[in-house]
Image (cartoon, rainbow, N blue to C red):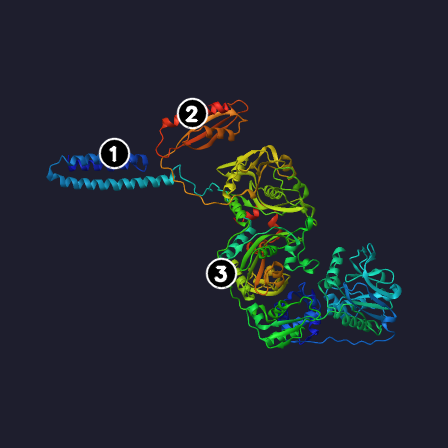
Amino acid sequence: MGADRIDEVRRAFVRDLEAAGTDPDAVERVRVAYAGRRSGQLLELTGALRELPAEARRDYGRALNELKGLVEERLEAAREAAQAARASTGADVLDVTLPGAAVPRGAEHPVHLVRRRIESIFLRMGYSVEDGPEVEDDWHNFEALNIPPDHAARDDQDTFYLPGGYLLRTHTSPVQARVMRRGSPPIRIIVPGRVYRRDSDLRHSPMFHQIEGLVVDEGITFGHLKATLETFLRALFSDRVGVRFRPSYFPFTEPSAEVDITCIFCQGAGCGMCSRSGWIEILGSGMVDPRVFEKVGIDPDRYTGFAFGIGLDRVALLRHGIPDLRLMFTGDPRLARQFA
Amino acid sequence: MRFDLGWLNEQLDGEPEPDLLAERLTACGFNVEVREPVAGTEVWDVDVTTNRPDAMNHRGLAREAAVACGIGLRSHAFEMVEAGDPASTSVAVAVDDPERCSRYVARVVRGVRMVQSPQWLRARLERCGVRPINAVVDATNLVLLELGQPLHAFDLDLLAGRRIIVRRARPGERLVTLDGVERTLTDDMLVIADGERAVGLAGVMGGANTEISERTVDVVLESAHFEASGVRRTARALGMHTEASHRFERGADPEMAAWACDAAAALIARLTGARVAPERIDVHPRPRAAAQIELSVPALGRFAGLDYEPAEVAWILDGLGFAPDAAGDRITCTVPSWRVDVERTADLYEEVIRHVGYDAVPAVLPVLPTPPGERCGGWGLVDRARDAAVCVGLVEVVTYAFIDEASDALVTGSAMEPGDPLPLVNPLARTQSTMRRSLLPGLLGGVREALNQGESGVAVFEEGRIFWQRDDRPGEAERLAIALAGVHGSWQRVEPVGFASLKGVVEAVCGGIPMPLAEWRRGGGPWLEPGQGAEILSADGRVVGIAGRLADGLQQLWGLRQPVWVAELDLRAAAQPGVTSYQPLPRFPAVSADVTVEHDRALAFSELERTAREAAAELVERLELTARFEGEGLPAGRVRTTLRIVYRHPDRSLTQDEVNTMQAALRQQLAERLGVDFA
C-alpha cells in the first residue's frame, strides 16, 4: 500500500468514468464505486493511511487529497455532461410550449368594473357608498327632486310605470332624497345603481347604470363642485384630461352644469367620437336646489351642497371602445370575458 | 331648436364672429350642438333646456347672446296701419276658465288674399324646420319663431255666431284637429269654441272646421296665454306634441301675447294686402304682478366661491331684463314676464354665475371632516357574491330586468316564487313587459348565444334584483344565478359539466359570500328536470336556492342544443362575514383509511355520510368521498361508494392497530344501521 495504490486507483477511476460516458446511471455507479460513503475505494485508501509509518503519511495524505479533489471534480463534470445530454435528447424532455392546464378565470361585467373603479376613487376621498330601491314612488323620484306632476321636465325622463302608482326609478337621485331625509349634514355619499328610462336606440337603453354623488354641509360652494369633479375625472381618465363646465338645467340643482372632458380618442382635436367638437359630455351636476332641501327637511339657509351623476355604461363604452350600448345587456358572456 | 344665424344677428346691435358667438352661447348655457352652413348664413341647432321657454325663439336667444357678447339688443319694431270697423264689431271673446287661460288677445284682419309668402320668409321658416303653407299661416309661424308666442288664425266667416269662447270641453265632445284626426275630448281639456262647437284645442292645435283656406277673406288672430300643466295634460292625453304645446307646457310670456298679435297682424297685412281692424281685443282676467327679488352680492360670492363686482352683476341682470336697482352690494330685481323659471334668489345666482362664466370660478377642494368612507346597504353583499363567482371562474352578464310574461310565469308555483308578477304599465315591447321574478330567463338567452357561436363551455352568472308585488306593494331582492353548459377542463382532461360541477360551483360561491347552506334535497320546481335538480335549504329550513339541470321542455323552448345546468340563489340568506378565530395547527400526522360499501342506489350519500359521521370515533377529523361506482360487476340498482376516513389524535401519533380497530367498528355500525355490504 502506498502512493502506487493511489496511482492505480486514479487510473482505474479515469478509465471507468470515461467508459461511463454520459449515461447517468453508469456515472452514478462509478461514483458509488469510488466515492461511495460506505464502500468506495477512496474510503479504503483513507483507511490505509493509519497503517502507514508516520514518515510516509504526509506524502500519502497529500496524494490522497489530490485524488479526492480530482474524483470530485471529474464526477461533477460527468454528471453535468450526463444531465446536458439527457436534456437534449431524452424521452422525458418537456415541450414547454404546450398550453397550461386551464384554470378557469371569471370576469366581471365592464359596467361593474367601472363602478368599482369609481367607487374606489370616492371611497378614498371619504365618501360612503349608498343604496336604494329600484322600484320607487313618485315622491322620491320626482317631487322631492323639484319635478312636480305635469311638469315639462318629466319629458326628459320618460318613465316606466308599475301598478299602484309606483315606477322604475329614472335616476339614482331618489336615494339622495332618502339619505337627506334620514340623516343630517355633513353628507358625503355616492350612489351607484341601475336606472330605467323608456327609450331604446343606439345611444339609449331602457335600462342603464348611474353613479350619483351628493355633498351637503355649511359653506359648500360651486368652486368645491368644480374641484371635486375635476379631481374625480382626472383620477378616472387621466391627469391630462381637460374638463369643461357648461351651464345646463336639472330641476334638482341650481345652477346646473354639464361637464365635458376633452375627447379621449382625439385628445380634443375633433373626431367622429366627439362629433368633431373635441369634447365628450360625461357628467351632469349642480348646486342642490334649495327647494330640494326644503322637501327633505334640511335648512337651505344654513346648508348648501352639490350633486352630480355619471352614466356608468357610457364610461364603460368610452373606456373600452364598445360601440353600442345595447351590446352591454344581451347576456352574452363573451363581452365580459374580453375584460378578464 | 334650430336657429337662423342671420335672423339672430338681426336682433343684435353689432355682429359678433360666429365662432365667438357659438362659444359664448355654449358657455352661458345654450349649447350650440350643430352648425350647418346654408346659403350665405348658418343654421344652428341649439340645445335650449326645458326651463328656458323664453329662449326658444330668436329674440329670446338674442337677448342671451347680447349679454354673453357684451353688446346691445336692438329694439323690435314693425309698422301697422289700422283701417275699417273696430274688431269688436266682427267678433266677441269670452274666457270662461281664467285659471287655464289668463289672457286672450285677438286681432281681426280683413280682406286677406291667399298668396304664397315671399322667398325670404319661406327660407327662414325652412331653415328652422317649418314647412311654408300660405302667407297667413306663415306669418303666425314666423312670429312664433321670432318672439316665441304661439298664434292661431281662424277663418272669421266659419266662426258660428262670430263668437270665441274659451271653455272646458264637454265630456265626449269631438273635434277634428288640423292634422285631420278626430279627437274625443274630456272635461279636463280646454277648448276654443264658437257659438256652437269646439274650434280649437287650446294651446295645442286648431280645429279643421275653422281652418284658413283659399276661400278665407277675414281672419281672426288668436294670441293667448294658457296655463302650462293643463296644456301638458291635454297634449299627453291625446298623444300630441306641437310647437305651441311645447312652449305653453314650459311656460309662455303672458305679456308677449299683445305685442306678438300686433306683429303678426301687421305682417299679414303687409304680405297679403289685407287691412288690420282697429282695436286689439284683450281679455286679461288674471294679470300677473311682476315679482321682486333681492340679491346680495357678497352672499352670491360665498355661494359660488368667487367675489363678484356689483357693477358687473348689475350689468348682466340689466341685459337679461331684470331691471336691477342697486343699493351698495344689494340689488333688487324685477323678474321680467318671460322668465317663468326665476322665482327666488338662487335663480338669480345662476344668472350671474353662468354669465360671468363657470370658468371664472376657481376650483377648490372642500375641506370636510374625513371619516373613512363605507360601503352601505346591499353593495357589500352583492360585491362579495360577485367576487365569489368570478373567483370560481364564472363570467358575469347583465341582462334587462324586464322580461316576457311567459318566461316570468315559469317561476310560479316554485319555492323560489317571491310573490305575484309585477307587470309594467307602459312597456316598450312585449318581450319586456313584466319585471323578472327570476334571473334565469335572462341568463339563458346569453348561454344560447354563446353556445350557438361555438363556445365549447359556458360558465356564467348574473347578480341582480328580482321584483314582485304582494298585497299591492312592490318588492325587490338581490339574487345570483349561475348557468353551466358544454364542457369544462383543459386539453389534458375535458369533461362535460354535470350536477357535481354545478354543486361544486354553488358551494364555492356560497362559501365565499358567505351564505351558509344547510341541506340539499331533491326538488326544484318547474325550472328543473324532475329527478335532476335540488332545492337548497338554509339552517332555518327555508328554500334559498335551486340547482339542477334545466327541464327538457325549457331547454327546447330556449333553443338550447345541449343540457344546461342552472342555479339561482336568494342572497337574502347571506350572512355577515365574521372574523375567523385561529385554530392551532395539528402537531401529529393524520392517518387515513378507506372503507368501500356496496348499497342500493336509493341510499342518499348524505345519509351514508351522516351515519358514518355519527358512528365514527372521536378521532375522525374528516370524511371524504373518494370513489363511486356503478355498472359492470355490480347488480342493477347497486352502487359502490368509497369513503376515506381521516383520523388524527391531538396529542400523539396514532398506530395502525388503533386505526384498524376504529375502522372495524365503523364497518360494523354501517352494516347494522344501513344494511350495506362491504366490497
User: Is residue B345 in view?
Assistant: yes
SS for callout 1: helix
Q: Is A291 left, or right, of B286 in this rendering? A: left
Q: CA distance from mark 2 to mark 3?
A: 67 Å
For badge 1, the amino acid type reads: Ala
Q: Nearer the viewer, residue B52 or B300?
A: B300
Q: Are marks 2 and 3 on the same chain?
A: yes
Q: Residue B655 occupies which quadrant of the picture?
A: top left
Mark 1 or 3: in front is 3
Q: Which mark is residue A33?
A: 1
Q: CA distance from mark 1 to mark 3?
A: 80 Å
- Residue B493 location (% of width, % of height): 49, 36
On the image, numbered disc 3 is attached to which residue?
B369
SS for callout 2: helix
Residue pictured at 74% horizontal, 65% vertical? B126
Q: Nearer the viewer, residue B220 or B484?
A: B220
- Residue A188 location (% of width, % of height): 54, 58
Question: Label 1 lies in what chain?
Answer: A
User: Is residue B428 in view?
Assistant: no
Q: Residue B195 occupies which quadrant of the picture?
A: bottom right
- Are the residues flagged by discs 1 and 2 in contact, CB closer than 8 Å? no
Question: Label 2 lies in what chain?
Answer: B
Mark 1 or 2: in front is 2
- Residue B530 location (% of width, % of height): 61, 32
SS for callout 3: loop
Q: Quadrant of the N terminus of chain A?
A: top left
On the image, numbered disc 2 is attached to which residue?
B665
- Are the residues flagged by discs 2 and 3 in contact, CB closer than 8 Å? no
For badge 2, the amino acid type reads: Ala
Count all numbered tags in the image, as a single digit.
3
